[in-house]
Image (cartoon, rainbow, N blue to C red):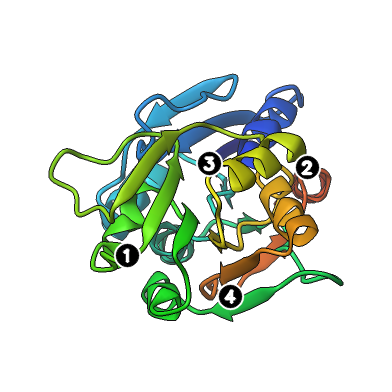
Amino acid sequence: MRVLILGGTGDAAELMARVSNITGIEAIASLAGRTRKPTLPSGKVRVGGFGGVSGLVEYLRQLQVDVLIDATHPFAQQISENAARAAQEASIPRLMLIRRPWERVSGDRWLEVESNIAAASVLENQAKRVFLTVGRQELSAFAYLQNIWFLMRMIDPPDADALVPPGMILCDRGPFALEDEKQILIQHNIDTIVSKNSGGDATYPKIIAARELGIQVVMVNRPAVPPGEQVADVDSAVKWLLEKIVNGQ
């Protein structure tokens, strides 16, 4: 069985490592290439886009892929939609591995919004110093807020011609430790965090730190995912694949 794993998350890398050790499965991981120096999973890896649905369908057919697993970031809406359409056109099974979103608990001061544009609107006249953790490709939505200071954390720096709000760029890659996150918030006198609800453990410490320090979090909710089978963890994805082998797909 040949399996294509659309990756870009820690879950995808873990799945690739697990699947590569299963007899009877040849796994290929595909990364979009948005991160300049991505952490490459073990095994066979390709980097770059497919050229839309038609390009992905051609790739699936050319390599005779039997199963497609979408383990992309919860906010990678376009590639997930493309994967759904391509799997249907290629007539192959598709699974979405989508980690559970964070849930508000006692002590959290969350304001939930549906987009980065809505998050920026919320900040007007309410925030002065913001910890912005939505990624370098989303900065332009906040660039007009010239009266707010932003600490902007991302893996890679923004392009030279990118629209960026005033403040400071911090390039770093998770996982992050709770005490370090608290120190950042205190050191920079942060009054608001803007975060996507990515789920997972790697960046959750900032949410705990905000809770413990009484800092507001503007939480951007996830976009809708296309219909189809989905699981929330790697173990369940491996089990699903093994069942496909047993049942001959």
Foreground: 188 or 2? 188
Disc 4 versus disc 2: distance between alpha carbons? 20 Å
Mark 3 or mark 1: whose residue is earlier in sequence: 3
Callout 3 touching callout 1 (CB < 8 Å) = no
Question: What residue is pinned by disc 4?
Answer: 227
Mark 4 or mark 2: whose residue is earlier in sequence: 4
At 58% across and 75% down in the image, what residue appears? 227
Q: Which mark is residue 238?
A: 2
At 21% across and 40% down in the image, what residue appears? 159
Q: Position of residue 168 (x, y in %)?
A: 36, 42
Mark 2 or mark 1: whose residue is earlier in sequence: 1
Disc 2 versus disc 1: distance between alpha carbons? 40 Å
Mark 1 or mark 4: whose residue is earlier in sequence: 1
Disc 2 versus disc 3: distance between alpha carbons? 15 Å
Q: Residues within 10 Å of mark 3 (few under 14, many from 20)?
A: many
Q: Relative to 82, say whether 9 is above or below.
A: above
Q: Position of residue 123 (x, y in %)?
A: 43, 74
Question: What residue is pinned by disc 1?
Answer: 142
As helix, strand or loop, the secondary structure at mark 2 comes to helix
Foreground: 4 or 96? 96
Question: What residue is pinned by disc 3?
Answer: 7
Mark 1: amino acid: Phe
Q: Position of residue 71 (x, y in %)?
A: 59, 49
Instruction: Describe residue 179's horizontal placement relative to residue 73 as left or right.
Output: right
Callout 4 touching callout 2 (CB < 8 Å) = no
User: Mark 2 against mark 1, which lies toward the viewer?
Assistant: 1
Instruction: Describe residue 168's horizontal placement relative to residue 174 as left or right.
Output: left
Q: Residues within 10 Å of mark 2 (few under 14, many from 20)?
A: some
User: Mark 3 against mark 1, which lies toward the viewer?
Assistant: 1
